[in-house]
Amino acid sequence: MCRAGGGCRAGGERATGPVGAAAGAAPEMGEQPIFTTRAHVFQIDPSTKKNWVPASKQAVTVSYFYDVTRNSYRIISVDGAKVIINSTITPNMTFTKTSQKFGQWADSRANTVFGLGFSSEQQLTKFAEKFQEVKEAAKLARDKSQEKIETSSNHSQASSVNGTDDEKASHAGPADTHLKSENDKLKIALTQSAANVKKWEIELQTLRESNARLTTALQESAASVEQWKRQFSICRDENDRLRNKIDELEEQCGEINREKEKNSQLKRRIEELEAELREKETELKDLRKQSEIIPQLMSECDYVSEKLEAAERDNQNLEDKVRSLKTDIEESKYRQRHLKVELKSFLEVLDGKIDDLHDFRRGLSKLGTDN
């Protein structure tokens, strides 16, 4: 519940700047924001009392304000420099949720019905709970104000009666002045009370008229809801029929797709068989061409066979020559080895002779030296 000092602030955006330029729309010095949210604002069409008219082009700030001096609550919202909501909360007001994201309340003083569209159901629930808290706080404030007025009136009446008795008893001059002052205060209080009673009677009449309009609007809304329910039932039946038709068509489409898949497989098999047939025809053509050149190949084969036989004979002759050459080579190697042995013996004898010549020369040299 909201405290008397405006202590029930909820999380939300704080309103910045003046709320409006119209008289009584801007928050006064004693007013404090206690709850702020954002919503799309609508007002009931004054001509039809049925359709909603957008009061804002986009979501705007909607705030609860508490007036400390007057102990009252207001809902205020502006769109740019235009005041679109300036509604004082009274205990007779009711906030109604008409959908998951939309709610409304009637303001008899403004002679209109305000509607708020929220972006989520949670925001709507918080706003409705805050409306109920503010409504209860306004009711308590009204009850306290009435108790004060009744207490003041009773006290003034008691003082007046007591003062009259004292006057009759004592006939004192200062008491007359005091009683006169009390009577004046009582008259002022009674005048204010009468004015308040007239004001409350006017407000009650206005609320009754607003309630009658709201009752009519609710009845029309109920009729519209029934009509929408019938249309919804018709649409639902039509939707079920169309859904069944769609299921049948989907089943038929499935069968068609299976047939298409089979046809595709058959086409692929036919294409494969046609490709194999073309390959076989190509091989057959090649074999026919080869059969045409078989006689030529046979004659060429005979010629090659003759050539091969001649080459074999030549090869045999060459092999004989090779064997003969190998024999000659072996004999030549043998003679070379024999010549090497003889040459080695000759060289050894020659070396001995050369040594003897050297000795003989040294002897001749020695003889020449002696002579």
Image (cartoon, grey):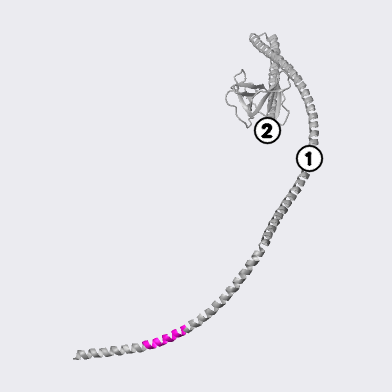
Q: Main secondary structure of the magenta part?
A: helix
Say left or right for 71 vs 333.
right
Q: Which quadrant of the structure image shows residue 182?
A: top right
Which of 331/72 is in front?
A: 331
Q: Residue at x 46, y 83 (%)?
A: 332
Relative to 114, residue 280 above or below: below
Label 2 sits on a secondary structure element that is loop
In the foreground, 285 or 214 = 285
- Kindly identify the residue that appears in the image at 66 percent across and 27 percent down: 40
Name the amino acid, label 2.
Ser
SS category of the residue bearing label 1: helix
Label 2, label 1: how many angstroms apart (C-alpha)?
A: 39 Å
Q: Pointer 2 and pointer 1: residues touching (CB < 8 Å)?
A: no
Name the residue beneath numbered marker 2: 120
Is 103 magenta? The answer is no
Q: Position of residue 187 (x, y in %)?
A: 68, 11
Task: Spot the residue most to the left.
Answer: 371
Q: Label 1 amino acid?
A: Leu
Q: Classify residue 225 as left or right of residue 144.
A: right
Residue wearing tag 1? 249
The image shows residue 219 at horizontal and vertical percentages of 78, 23
Q: Which residues are magenta?
A: 332-347
At label 1, counting other C-alpha atoms closer than 10 Å, the crowd grade (few under 14, some 14-19, many 20 or more) is few
Point out which mark residue 32 bears: none
